[in-house]
Amino acid sequence: MLIEPRRNILIGPLLQIALRRCWAQRDHLLRLGIVPVALIVAIAVPLRRALEAMRLSMSPNGIGDPDLAARCLMLAVAYGFVVAVFAVNWLRQLTLGTRAAPGLGLALNMRHLRFFCAVLAIAMAAMVPVMLVLYPIFVVALQGEAALVAVAAMGSMVWAALLARLSPSWIGIAIDAPMRLSLAWRRTAGQGFKLVVALLAVEVGALLGQQVVATVFEITGLAHVAPMTYLLITAIVDLAAVAVELAVLVTAFPYFLRETV
């Protein structure tokens, strides 16, 4: 007979289990994270410069230099691909073991590309309506850069919600257990808010950690003396947060499966 998935996900235990899983596999996290961290730092340097130049070129109506916008977009896509490759390897490590994610995680194949395209499509599905509907309102209400920040924040919230609701589908791509988007949406019904809260809790913790690091670097003057060290620490915190967030969703994944007994 078919057993319906359980519907008693609790945020606290979910976070605790995810953190324990990451700590238990910290050596593998380091192994799979070395190359992505190096690439993230390499991308972050020109990306920050392009974003700063974009900010300075911003007109009062929220329009910036299109060439700079294209450069920012290209670098952001490269950043996203690096994170997607890490995500696939880490998901496979958490669920299937070391043999499914050997070495430094450099053995790329079509599942990495499919995973990246799936997450990118979800991001576009989240951002396009926000840009079309809310951006004109924010431009009038907030002006220039503030409007872009508001749109980015709103789009990120919608993206997080969609990622959580559709997580069984894109996790399935990583571990070779595909699930249709419509089925994933039905299976996570009633649990999306809990998953989003858990993801936000991890993200807030990461932001607080980065703020502490930024404050220490600013007070000690290291921000000007050792900027690359600051970027490295920031990249490590970012990737660690991604690892914990993925562990949260992987821990919840079995709740959305039917079991036949």
Image (cartoon, rainbow, N blue to C red):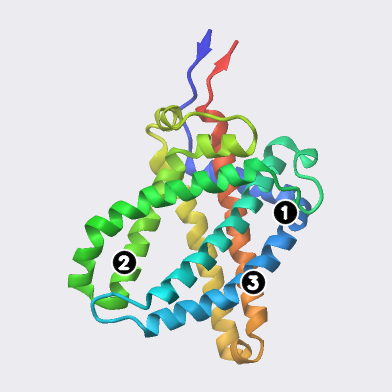
Of callouts 3 and 2, the N-terminal one: 3
Q: Mark 1 — residue?
A: 29
Q: What's the residue at 44%, 32% (across, down)? A: 181
* Quadrant position of residue 194: top left
Query: Percent x, y for residue 16?
Result: 59, 46
Image x and y of residue 117, in percent: 52, 46
Q: Nearer the viewer, residue 177 or 226?
A: 177
Question: Is residue 16 at least partly visible in the picture?
Answer: no
Q: Is residue 114 left or right of residue 39?
A: left
Q: Which SS class for mark 3?
A: helix
Q: Nearer the viewer, residue 177 or 249?
A: 177
Circle 3 sits on which residue? 41
Between 52 and 234, the residue placed more toward the observer is: 52
Is there a contact, CB below 8 Å, between mark 2 and mark 1? no
Q: Earlier in the sequence, mark 3 or mark 1?
A: 1
In-image side of 151 versus 83 (left or right):
left
Q: Quadrant of residue 31?
A: bottom right
Residue located at (36% from left, 50% from top): 126
Q: Which residue is mark 2?
A: 150
Q: How many marks?
A: 3
Mark 3 Cα shell of 10 Å, populated few (<14), some (14-19), many (≥20): many
Rendering coords of residue 188 (x, y %): 43, 32
Q: Is residue 129 above or below residue 227?
A: above
The extreme front residue here reads: 67
Asked if one can make out residue 17 in the rendered structure from this viewpoint, the answer is yes
